[in-house]
Image (cartoon, rainbow, N blue to C red):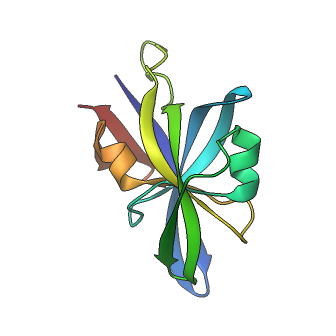
């Protein structure tokens, strides 16, 4: 079972950037919520901001943890999450839910980053000029 995602390119401060968006379905306290996530190959953990966590129905509380990135360091919280990757591109089959631990960060708004660890456990990756391909392990 596999799926693909479009690679979009843009220029930011004179540098060409490539981005991949993956739509996940999160199984939170309010039911199933679909959310676009930017695939971040440099992220150890999938990360969401407090506003996104609330919209997804993620639990309050969690284990405090330091989070560092390009914009500095903050104290976030680790929370248990259950989610599904997009359906299979050929059959349309819905994937089984998977469990992970995500980081919820304060301050920033509308952050939804899918970390490489969550992807690499379940898929091998390849690309061409227009798409990233996620092939189930």
Say above or below: 119 vs 122: below
Say above or below: 108 vs 28: below
Residue 98 sits in which quadrant?
A: top left
Name the spot of residue 34 as percent of width and height, x first. Answer: 66, 33
Closer-to-camera residue (39/80): 80
Q: Is residue 21 left or right of residue 2?
A: right
Name the spot of residue 90 as percent of width and height, x first. Answer: 42, 17
Q: Residue at x 69, y 30 (%)?
A: 29
Closer-to-camera residue (89/83): 83
Say above or below: 108 vs 47: below
The C terminus sits in image quarter:
top left
The N terminus sits in image quarter:
top left
Q: Is residue 25 left or right of residue 115?
A: right
Say above or below: 48 vs 106: above
Q: Tell me if I can see residue 128 in this picture.
A: no
Residue 112 sits in which quadrant?
A: bottom right
Name the spot of residue 21 as percent of width and height, x first. Answer: 55, 49
The tally of labels here is 0
Q: Residue at x 58, y 49 (%)?
A: 37
Q: Is residue 118 left or right of residue 61?
A: left
Q: Tell me if I can see residue 45 in this picture.
A: yes
Name the spot of residue 41 as percent of width and height, x first. Answer: 39, 61
């Amino acid at each position: 079972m596999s799926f693909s995602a479009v690679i979009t390119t843009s220029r930011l401060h004179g540098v060409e950037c490539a981005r991949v968006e993956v739509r996940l379905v999160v199984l939170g306290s309010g039911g199933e919520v679909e959310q676009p996530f930017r695939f971040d190959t440099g992220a150890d953990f999938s990360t969401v901001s407090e506003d996104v966590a609330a919209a997804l129905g993620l639990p309050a509380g969690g284990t405090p943890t330091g989070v560092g990135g390009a914009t500095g360091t903050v104290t976030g919280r680790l929370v248990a999450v259950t989610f599904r990757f997009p359906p299979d591109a050929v059959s349309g089959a819905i994937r089984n839910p998977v469990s992970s631990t995500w980081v919820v960060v304060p301050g920033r708004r509308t952050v939804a980053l899918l970390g490489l660890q969550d992807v690499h456990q379940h898929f091998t990756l390849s690309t061409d000029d227009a798409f990233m391909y996620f092939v189930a392990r």
